[in-house]
Amino acid sequence: MTRYSRRTLLKAGAAFAGASAIGSPAILSAQAARIKIGHLVPLTGFLGAIGSYAQLGVKMAAEEINASGGIMGKQIDLMSEDSVNPATASTKAQRMIEQDGAALLFGEISSASSLTIMQVAERNKKVFFSTGARSDALRGKNCNRYSFHCDIPNTVMVNAVGTALKQQGLVKGKKFVTLPADYIFGHDLLKAAKVFFDANGATLTGDELIATDVTDFSPYLLKIRQAKPDVVCSNLAGNQVTTLIKQYSEFGLPYPIVGFNLNTADAWAAGDGNLSGTWPTVWYHTLDVPASKAFVAGFLKKYGKPPENHAWIEYVAFKMMAQAMTDTKSTDTDKLIAYFEKETEFDILKARKAHFRAWDHQLMQEAYPFTVRPKGQANDQWDFIALGTAVPKAGEPLEQLAPTQEQNPCSL
């Protein structure tokens, strides 16, 4: 065993301390030269498939920004992790701010996890861009000054699909059965659906809540067969939608199935011939807008497949965030909030520009109903969706389908 004298140890300690003192400024300078963004998105569980698309979209945006010189001459350091569940999402969000030095928080699809991240953002007075959570409650009774909501909320999805269903004569006087997910998103979507049914002369005859881990829908499908509704409505999320659609097709039920929520990755997973009816989406890769086509081409070249709607929304949301930092020349929370609250317009690769409403921080934008091409008419595995006309229509206010200030209990 080698022994060292006390003097040798003291000299070594002093040398180490000196080296640390010299090295620390360099390390701190390198850290200060980067803008750290905490990104959370589900990569496992029932939302994992769409979360993986979201991660691709945000990484593409960050790489493009860094390649063009970054923001204020600083490179973006995107810290992207699996949010897992609400408790883990909260813990990771807090760590990203406290230990990792995140300037703001970004991402999420689960409404339950988004709510916990919103609370972390409020406690720490940091901006949170909620990119994919759709619960009305997040921008309603649970809203806070630090959180901004990029996806269309449940009420808009219901109204978008409902408008198309009315045009098909599938609302007034019709009996509906809905299958809502048993968490904040599904509860909220069911509430919005009930409001729509009541206002438009439809009857809701069944609405059993379904746990997010259910994979066998046969008990619910047997009840639907007994109830004999005019229309069946899916209010599920993630890969449960795909599972339901496939089992519904196998049961051969004669009632049309529609939905107030569907992500395009789940539609693709259902496969040609298994999906039918009318559904809502916030964006689709066939949108005939030059900027959108350019994004799709870049994504295809980089990843070998078209972007799903969460890839698109993370991409454009990250670009909005970068625009705000560039224009304000700051990552300061109050300056960023003021920038968004003056209802600055953003190009989000659609025909119309978008803006955040000042009083509830909801992004006002177009949405689209879509139908499904008959089996065998798709050009490829991503082509069996036929996008409908944007709502609200050109010339109508973007706020038309969204909850009004009287309907929304948000108080920032």
Image (cartoon, rainbow, N blue to C red):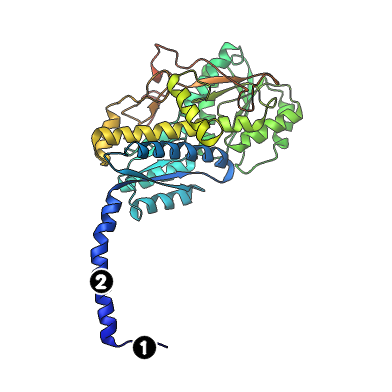
Which quadrant: the N terminus?
bottom left
- Judging from the image, what secondary structure is the residue with disc 2 in? helix
How many residues crowd around disc 1 within 10 Å: few (fewer than 14), some, or many (20 or more)?
few
Residue 371, visible in the rendered structure: yes
Badge 2: residue crowd in 10 Å (few <14, some 14–19, many ≥20): few
Q: In x, y percent, where is residue 330?
A: 25, 39
* Amino acid type of the residue tagged 2 in the rendering: Ala
Residue at the disc numbered 1: 3
Q: Nearer the viewer, residue 179 or 194?
A: 179
Instruction: Please tell me which residue is depicted at 32% across the width and 24% down the height of the picture.
Output: 345
**x%, y% of residue 238?**
58, 37
Residue 17: which disc? Answer: 2
Q: What residue do we see at 23% from left, 64% from top?
A: 22
* In-front residue for pair 12/377: 12
Earlier-in-chain disc, 2 versus 1:
1
Give me the residue at 39% from left, 28% from top. Answer: 363
**Residue 232: x %, y % from top left:** 65, 25
Residue 126 screen position, x and y as percent: 32, 44
- Secondary structure found at label 1: loop
* Quarter placement of the C terminus: top left
Measured Cα–Cα span from mark 2 to mark 1 = 22 Å
